[in-house]
Amino acid sequence: MPLSNLAVRDIETVAHPYTNLATLRESGPLVIERGQGVFVYDSNGKAYIEGMAGLWCTALGYGNEELVEAAAAQMRKLPFAHLFTAKSHDPAIELAEKLKEIAPVPTSKVFFCNSGSEANDTQVKLVWYMNNALGRPQKKKIISRHKAYHGVTIASASLTGLPNNHRDFDLPIAGVLHTGCPHHYRFAQAGESEDDFARRLASELESMILREGPDTVAAFIAEPVMGAGGVIVPPKSYFPEVTNVCRKYDVYMISDEVICGFGRLGTMFGCTALGFEPHSISVAKALTSAYVPMSAVTVPEVMYQAMLDESRKIGTFGHGFTYSGHPVAAAVALKTLEIYARERIAEQAAGKAPQFLARLSALGDHALVGEARGLGLVGAVELVADKATKRGFDAKAAVGARAVRFAEDEGLIVRFIAGDILSICPPIVITPAEIDELFDRLGRALDRTLDWVKRERLADGA
Ligand SMILES: Cc1ncc(COP(=O)(O)O)c(C=O)c1O
């Protein structure tokens, strides 16, 4: 099919994030024009179920007039104000109060940023700053995990544990370490139970801390359920085990709630679902249901006191973004949180999860699917060339990309991540009938992918 005028203009002008820039020149972009509910419509008017809630973020779906109104009202009243140099404004104050109230961890203050990456960069800087203030300047290393996703700015991309975010970017920076990924299907030893696997990972983390020297290790950061690394749900005992290790060596724990925060896993925050209490959380995405960019980091009292001491010593706290606590974003976030409370968003997700997970797990029987996994309303199917040996496809065959294209033909947007893994993360407001429709479309897309794999002779057994 010839490319549309818009597609040609896109190729000539837009430098796309997270896109194969070479194949984009042939295929062109999918140009989305509008959205309503869980559906988005392309520039030809074709409807798609947004099976990824955009990028794991539009929890309330599209066309929410309350959010539009909250933004418009704030724009009319005060479209911009900032928090620098002892200035403030109502929406930021109210939102900080609200986040303190609902945060799953004791929180003294809230620091606002604009993206998940900025939030996690801020986490790193605050930990460094705190440890300097506390007189332990050597305690600076941050431990993350292989396959983690924490963003793409220099520090957060370093925390990210995916090769593509490091290769040829000269990352990770010094002082960032990666420990094992809690994916039992891929990384457990033969015959190892989930609990034994979790215990081994915790013990590997402990060995890493001891090898580096506990007085040099500042923090451990983790997503409750890993998102972009493959929707990896850890064994139940993993976080309790890892928390014990962190507590033992005074390692500050950060829960990256950028995907899991605000109900996605059936609890308001992911750390609650996974059974651990970090020192701080990073939130973004669903904080505003992605209608405008905003993120935040919670600051515990001990860190705030250290920051205060630094100010007494050196004056201004030298960190902050022009748009930290932007009043329009804060107003939209406040309205979003009001809707979450009113509509019991976490209970909604918990209520819909059994159907979502049953339909997901049924895909585990498909000839192409090595593992179907998920929690709450987020899931993935991992495509393999051989189910028995778990052997994946040659990356060059781009099977995941092909499956995404078949899904789009069927009117469904899903994403391939970390190879041939298809992720599914619909708006939380999705209805039971729409969940069925989503999985019907995904099933047909997988069947078409299997036919194509057979035609291309990409899998001996398929
Ligand atoms: C868990 C997690 N942390 C951080 C980020 C980075 O957020 P952003 O793309 O807003 O910088 C993402 C983005 O997908 C994420 O999933």
Image (cartoon, rainbow, N blue to C red):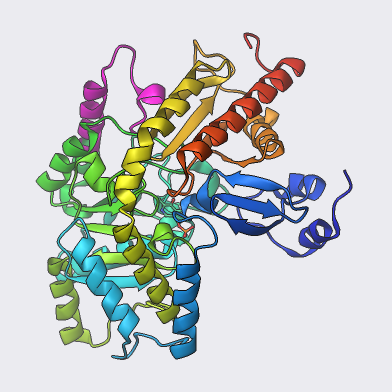
Decide if residue 111 is on the left or right side of residue 461.
Answer: left
User: What range is drawn magenta here?
Assistant: 181-206
Q: How many marks?
A: 0
Percent position (x, y) of residue 344? 30, 53
Ligand 1 falls in quadrant:
bottom left
- Quadrant where the C terminus sits is top right
Magenta-colored stretch includes residue 192: yes
Which quadrant of the view contains residue 203? top left
Decide if residue 3 is on the left or right side of residue 430.
Answer: right
User: In this rendering, does residue 137 appear at all?
Assistant: no
Decide if residue 6 is on the left or right side of residue 376.
Answer: right
Query: Given the current orientation, which residue lies at the most extreme front position?
Result: 433
Query: Given the current orientation, which residue lies at the most extreme left position?
Result: 248
Q: Residue at x 65, y 49 (%)?
A: 19
Q: Please, is residue 28 above or below residue 114 in the view?
A: above
Decide if residue 77 is on the left or right side of residue 15.
Answer: left
> What secondary structure is the stretch in magenta mostly built from?
helix
User: In this rendering, does residue 42 appear at all?
Assistant: yes
Depth check, front residue: 177 or 28: 28
Q: Residue at x 40, y 81 (%)?
A: 327
- Quadrant where the N terminus sits is top right
Magenta-colored stretch includes residue 130: no
